[in-house]
Amino acid sequence: MYAETEGIILKQIKIAGGRRMLVIFTKRYGKISAGTSISEGGKNRSALALRPFTYGKYQINKTGSHYHVNGGETIASHYPIGEDIDKYLCASFGMEFTDKLLPEEAAAPRLFLLLAEFLEMMEKRTKKHETLLVAYQLKALELSGSAPRLDSCVLCGAEEKLTGFCVSDGGLVCESCKTLSDSKERLIYDTGFGIVNVIKFLTQRPLSQLENLALDDDTLKWIKEVLKSYIEYHLDISCLKSEECMDRR
């Protein structure tokens, strides 16, 4: 089978014989792992299209269950991301998170377009890069069907006095349910009306409308901590290399 599809290079791994294994999020087939013999040091358009962060158009051949990239053409290299350490780390986190979130060979066109938009906006962003990152994570969770419940208490359905976020139960809890629960055992974080509204805003607005949004440090820290616990608990995604690098800065 021969096909041409748009894709984003999530990861590149060197293997024996001068070959490389690519992890590509394709618009047509979802995430695939594909080998290629295109020289890494080449200056032709195919070699340039195989670098991480690149959004391109790829010629792919499939034999049995194995994919092979025969050629590629760059649509957007996102080269400036690599020139700024904060952009690079946040974009790397987004790519690594997406790689872990996606199953193999399951088309996810809306998430593909979201990742393409995230990289384009990260390239242009000049400050508060982590605000864009957490917004992307929240939206990616929603598109994958793994988003936390934010409209009512996840335990009793109440819509008022939502003062806690319960990681294990997957969403907001009201004051009554929070009091009855063991917050340590159930991983319950204190929240407030302002925090809830911020999370809803990030989730409901298109990413393009968040271009100039910059969360304050305390709000950003809270959302990052809760997201980390939630994603680890429900999706078993943890110990990301890019996250460790960000934490050391």
Image: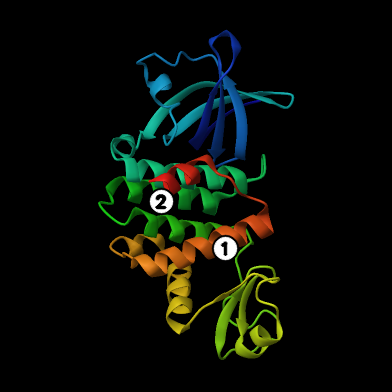
Question: Please, is residue 246 above or below residue 32 in the view?
Answer: below
Residue 167 x, y percent position in the rendering:
64, 68
Residue 105's disc is none
Label of residue 142 in the image: 1
Left or right of 16: which side holds 194?
left
Count of marks overlaid on the render: 2
Q: Which residue is drawn at 53% across and 54% down?
A: 110
The answer to whether the residues at label 1 and label 2 have Cβ atoms under 8 Å apart is no
Three-letter code for the amino acid on which mark 2 is drawn = Phe
Name the amino acid, label 1: Glu
Q: Quadrant of the N terminus?
A: top right
Q: Residues within 10 Å of mark 1 (few under 14, many from 20)?
A: some
Residue at figure coordinates x 55%, y 14% from the top left: 19
Q: Mark 2 points at which residue?
A: 118
Vertical placement of residue 12 versus 92, above or below: above
The residue nearer to you, when weighing 101 against 46, is 101
